Image (cartoon, coloured by chain):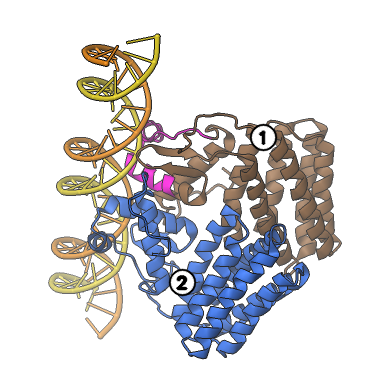
Chain colours: A brown, B blue, C orange, D yellow
Amino acid sequence: MTSSRRTIEPLVRESTPGIIADKLRTAIGRGDFKAGDQLGEAQLARELGISRGPLREGMQRLTQEGLLVSVRNRGLFVVEMTPENVRDMYVARAAIERAAAEQIFGHDPQDAGDQLLAVTGQMAQAASREDDPKVSEADIDFHQMLVSLSRSPRLVRIHQTLLTETRMCIHALEQTYRHSDDRVAEHRGIAEAFVALDPALTDARLVAHMEDAVVRLATGAPRRTTPSQPTPA
Amino acid sequence: MTSSRRTIEPLVRESTPGIIADKLRTAIGRGDFKAGDQLGEAQLARELGISRGPLREGMQRLTQEGLLVSVRNRGLFVVEMTPENVRDMYVARAAIERAAAEQIFGHDPQDAGDQLLAVTGQMAQAASREDDPKVSEADIDFHQMLVSLSRSPRLVRIHQTLLTETRMCIHALEQTYRHSDDRVAEHRGIAEAFVALDPALTDARLVAHMEDAVVRLATGAPRRTTPSQPTPA
DNA sequence: TATGGAACGATTGTTGACAATCCTACTGCC
DNA sequence: GGCAGTAGGATTGTCAACAATCGTTCCATA
């Protein structure tokens, strides 16, 4: 979808479990599965047109990521998004994105800032149309690009998981953002800090941005949405 | 092994793929599999006394972690430890451990410092006996405890992978440390910074510690140990 | 001698079936 | 009426067999 069109298939495809994992990750981020939902193997395998074997292998990847939790002889469930869970998620996000920013300052912060500003522009455009989903999409893109610009495979891989969880939150608590304008301003501030070649300012604004988000989300969703997940005694 | 003995088994065991993944992780960290080695399914399954199905599920977890790399229709291989790979690994480690330290300062840095000093004591003891493996073990324990004290499940999970990779490096390049005494001193310095309730000092010493390690390892292993891993044209 | 091609062996990828476990609903008994 | 016990259905856990692919080796040919 996102990559440029090819005339021929690459010689070696990605492994099947990897493709399955991607599909599941996208589905969870899109809100097709809500927090606490069980992922029935038989039905999912039918829908994907594959056997249960490769599906289970793909699901194990998401379990390792922490997106799914395993209950023996019961199945796999989408992780619950409790307030402390959200808080921990942003601890991890801050760790990764701050490190990414630091790496960027070791490469080409000017160029990075420009690219981030471009995304901010799209976000502003969507905000002017009051198209909240598109604003959220640009929000995700911004942070994804930020980490991508760090050129660190590990940071990117870890961040991918955290972004999926972020998408989950966005879909679970629709539009808890106060104003799209503030949202745009915060992101633009971060991008401009790169252009200004000011690592300390960038770091401070990133921390503030994360702090804002965790306060908004953790207080916005104090009660669990669905009591479907079994809680062991 | 590490946990206290139980008289009865817990009601719900950990999932089988999780156990398999743990065993493989330990084996890789112990050096049973070297960088670039292929993990043959049939033989491994025989050795573990299980079928290929659960084994493959467990291996997918390590693939998601980045410890194994998948080559379609060829199998799974232990990740190569190139210099840039080592560098990236320490970028990620620094990100996680610095964030962990920051979290600790939000909890009980005094107590954390004490606990870390205890580990440092064991390290010094091993160093006085010139027992390098034990020193390395204490080194790993130190960082594992550091992240554990952050009380962040995500940081702990991510860090677990990075520590396995660190163990790989330790086994691949035996004893590249200049002097065990310096090693002890560096760790003690970090622990003391916690006791001194000085976040900035702690952060600075953590960064310096990581910097030291990456320089030592990345320059110590410029050439790949085994040319066994197939490189796509 | 060097090169192209085919057959072989071994390993991975995938599937369907069987065994074990859990949850639910029903029945009988106190 | 409430509760222990039990049968049923459904889902997960595990396995062995089949299909597909890859690397190697050998042979024929220019």
Q: Secondary structure at mark 1?
A: loop
Residue at (52% x, 85% y) in the render: B125
In the image, B86: left or right of B71?
A: right
Q: In this view of the protein, which residue sits in the foreground, A137 or B39?
A: B39
Residue at (77% x, 64% y) in the render: A109
**Residues marked 1 and 2, same chain:** no
**Residue type pointed to by label 2:** Glu
Residue at (59% x, 84% y) in the render: B183
Q: Is residue B19 above or below residue A141?
A: below
| Count of marks placed on residues | 2
Quarter-of-image position of residue A112: bottom right
Q: In this view of the protein, which residue sits in the foreground, D3 or A223?
A: D3
- Mark 2 sits on what residue? B80
Q: In this view of the protein, which residue sits in the foreground, B153 or A128?
A: B153
Is any atom of residue B39 visible in this view?
A: yes
In the image, B191: left or right of B74?
A: right
Q: Is residue A175 above or below residue D22?
A: above
Residue B54 x/y as whole percent: 31, 51
Residue B202 x/y as whole percent: 72, 71
Residue at (67% x, 32% y) in the render: A173
As for residue B117 lying within the magenta part, the answer is no
Task: Chain letter for mark 2, please.
Answer: B
**What is the span of residues highlighted in magenta in the rendered image?**
A36-60
Secondary structure of the magenta portion, mostly? helix
